Amino acid sequence: MRSDHDPALTRQTRHASSREGESNSALGPVTEGFDFTQVRAAVSPHVRADLLAGASWAVLHGQQLVEVAAEGMARKAEPGQPAEPMRTDRLFRAFSNTKLFTSLAVLQLWERGLVDLDEPVDRHLPALAKPRVLRAGATSIGDAEPARGPITVRHLLTHTAGLSYAFLAPDSVLGQVYTAAGVSSPLTTLEQMVDALAALPLSFHPGTRWEYSVASDVLARLVEVISGQRFDAYLQDRLFQPLGLRDTGFVVPADQQHRLTGYYLGADPLQPMQPGLQRVDDTEPFPGAYLRPVPRLSGGGGLVTSLPDMVAMMRSLLPDGPTVLRPQTMALMMRDHLPVELHQAFPRQGPMPLRGHGLVGGIVRSRGPFDHPAAPGECYWGGSAGTQWFVNPLLNIAGAFMMQRVGGFSHPVAMDFKRSVYEVMVR
């Protein structure tokens, strides 16, 4: 994770971060000609209403950066500590934005012929051979039956493997045993996590349902086994360095921790539009998170990143940019890989039949009530604190939105942002 930026680029044209009066040439120049007033107008009310401390964002039209801005505060004022403005060089907890990087790493191995998408993952992770599945209505993990088939790499990439996430359903049978077994504990390695999963049943038969899960952490371990490198070393060698990502990593160096944005909890997690914010980064997701090394190099949620690095990543997913994958692979990964009868479904949100899943993120199948009419075909994902990305290959546009609020991924501000971006770009 580096913080040095070449100041020469700031003299070429109006710089991307000039609205904030800072120097951050990693973003590069902005192409004029688009009026993003309504995008800023979609975000600003959330900041003024104390629903959001601050945010930064960027929009790409092909390889051209057409919008970049920052709003509000990176850290609100506290007793003895002044407020610190949001800038485009701030660092953010990526959480599930990490999954994009993990999936790209697996697809690189696939391009090299080192793994097949439809091969059983136990060829590389033998601990996951012969999985068992909880029977319907089971009240204990012993009430399980042999799986009808193996877990494949494609199942892991599309969250159809039968794995789960304890934090999404903590009172369920699997949620309780995942917690007891330390499946997501930062104090265990990826190898230890796979060994823990080997002793637990699946939530459903592989390929028969969609459930958000620790699948990306299993994929991170797969990368380690096949490449022979630690997961962080592989990402540095094969993704971060080739794409020029300077700020992305599992630990924020001590001399860069002042750039880390504050993490906030809303007044009521079940009412996202209720004003009031409480800073929680000293305790969430665990004390000292991202400030010191831990054994778990989480492929599902372990990275910290910045807006410039997310812009670089988005450029790599659009035509004519620096990339780490072949064009055919990028087209494949942004296609819906779920059977028509399967779709996303989150606890408390219910079935989402208009949302499929590709190999690196969700796919907008059809327009939903909060979508712009041009959204179908979009590939997207984000983290629980609100860092989000989207690519619409049909329109050749992409965007990144960075905030730090518990439950930010589904907060209305993120939906308002994306919809307003479409309004500008389609018009």
Image (cartoon, rainbow, N blue to C red):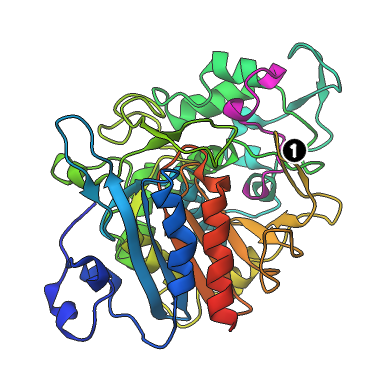
311 in relation to 267, above or below: below
Looking at the rendered structure, the kind of residue marked 1 is: Pro
Left or right, 254 with reference to 85: left
**Residue 242: % across, % down:** 33, 66
* Magenta residues (range): 157-174
Residue 38 or residue 147, whichever sits in front = 38
The percent coordinates of residue 251 (x first, y second) are 28, 40
In the picture, the quarter occupied by the C terminus is: bottom right
Instruction: Locate residue 421, reporting x and y percent.
Output: 53, 71
Q: How many marks?
A: 1
Instruction: Name the foreground residue: 65 vs 289.
Output: 65
Quadrant assignment, res 17: bottom left
Residue at figure coordinates x 32%, y 47% from the top left: 249
Relative to 136, is 252 on the left or the right? left
> Splitting the image into 4 quarters, where does residue 359 fall?
bottom right
Is residue 169 among the parts visible in the rendering? Answer: yes
Q: Which residue is mark 1?
A: 150
Name the dominant secondary structure of the magenta segment. loop
Give neighbour class at mark 1: few <14, some 14-19, many 20+ (Cα, 10 Å).
many
Left or right? Give the position of 351 relative to 218: right
Residue 160 lies within the magenta run: yes
Q: Does the segment drawn in magenta span residue 132?
A: no
The answer to whether residue 113 shows anywhere in this view is no
Q: Which residue: 29% across, 61% down? A: 88
Residue 208 falls in image quadrant: top right
Please, what secondary structure does the residue beneath circle 1 have? Answer: loop
Image point 53% across, 30% down: which residue?
A: 268
Q: Is residue 167 above or below residue 181?
A: below
* Left or right: residue 208 compared with residue 417: right
Residue at 80% x, 30% y: name it.
147
> Up-down: is 338 above or below 187?
below
Residue 353 percent coordinates (x, y): 80, 52
